[in-house]
Image: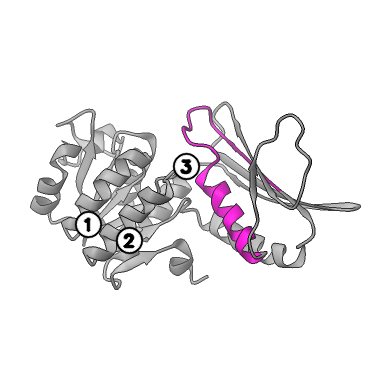
Amino acid sequence: MINAAVTGACGQMGGLIIQNIVKAENLQLSAAFDIANIGKDAGEVAHAGTLNIPISDVRDMKTVLKETGTDVLIDFTIANATVQNAPLVAECGVNLIIGTTGLFPQQRAIIDDAILKNNVSAVISPNFSVGVNIFFNILKQAAKYLPDYDIEIIETHHNRKKDAPSGTAMKAADVISEALGGKEYVFGRHGIAPRDKEIGIHAVRGGDIVGDHTVLFAGDGERIEIKHQAHSRNMFASGAVKAAEWVCGKQPGVYTMDDILGL
């Protein structure tokens, strides 16, 4: 049985991840971390039943991970928390699943370095949905056949999302840019803003929208729209739990969802 820990356990995603761990055949919850509800039962907070696993203070992470024999930790928090916690987790010899978005390149470099330095395995992805990762591959193929089309990316999320554009939108832009040999990004437009050969990226925030991503390829006389719509956050949580099962036992290194899906 794989011992899995969750940080951000009291958040919406943390709760869903705990629920999915409880349902998984090969995983069991070993620890849960947050800055709130310290000492409360993690299962009860996550509406997953009594698990007799208390929520631990993130400041005690290294001690708790070692005491519980945790094999893998799942982190869907915020960039500033992940860049502090991930190196501590790696130092404990614990594998990582990171779904945190909004990481700056310098922060990502710190995390990657800690993973490689401590010989652990990690899956890092802006989106753990199977459908979204198929979406990325469709975009890669479409871009190759539509190199002269204008490309715009529009992402829409709920009004509580902190970072913009979404990590998924940025990944979509990177996939297209790489397929086309490199493109400049323009984030929104204001005032006099003539279009060139850039990729336009636009963020919309409102209501309780889980996450919509549309990529528009616009040519003369026609356009193609490729869209992914998330109906539930549970797809992100279930994908992360599958990744946690997959990563344990793999050679040390940083993996993506492409590796898990064989893409």
Type of residue at label 1? Ala
* Image coords of residue 118 (percent x, y): 21, 63
Dot 3 or dot 1, earlier in sequence: 1
Structural distance between the alpha carbons of marks 3 and 1: 27 Å
Dot 1 or dot 2, earlier in sequence: 1
Q: Do the residues labelled 1 and 2 touch (CB within 8 Å)?
A: yes
Type of residue at label 3? Arg
Q: Quadrant of residue 131?
A: bottom right
- Residue 149 visible here: yes
Residue shown at the point (77%, 62%) measured from the top left: 146
Secondary structure under the numbered disc 3 in the rendered image:
loop
Any mark on residue 90, and which? 1
Q: Mark 3 points at which residue?
A: 233
* Mark 3 closeness class: few <14, some 14–19, many ≥20 residues within 10 Å: some
Residue shown at the point (16%, 56%) measured from the top left: 92
Q: In this view, does 151 lie above or below 259?
A: above
Structural distance between the alpha carbons of marks 1 and 2: 9 Å
Which residues are drawn in magenta?
152-179
Q: How many numbered tags mark residues here?
A: 3
Q: In this view, does 211 lie above or below 218?
A: above
Q: Mark 2 points at which residue?
A: 122
Q: Nearer the viewer, mark 3 or mark 2?
A: 2
* Mark 2 closeness class: few <14, some 14–19, many ≥20 residues within 10 Å: many
Residue shown at the point (62%, 45%) measured from the top left: 213
* Image coords of residue 33 (percent x, y): 22, 39
Is residue 247 rendered to the left or right of residue 125?
left
Secondary structure under the numbered disc 1 in the rendered image:
helix
Q: Quadrant of the N terminus?
A: bottom left
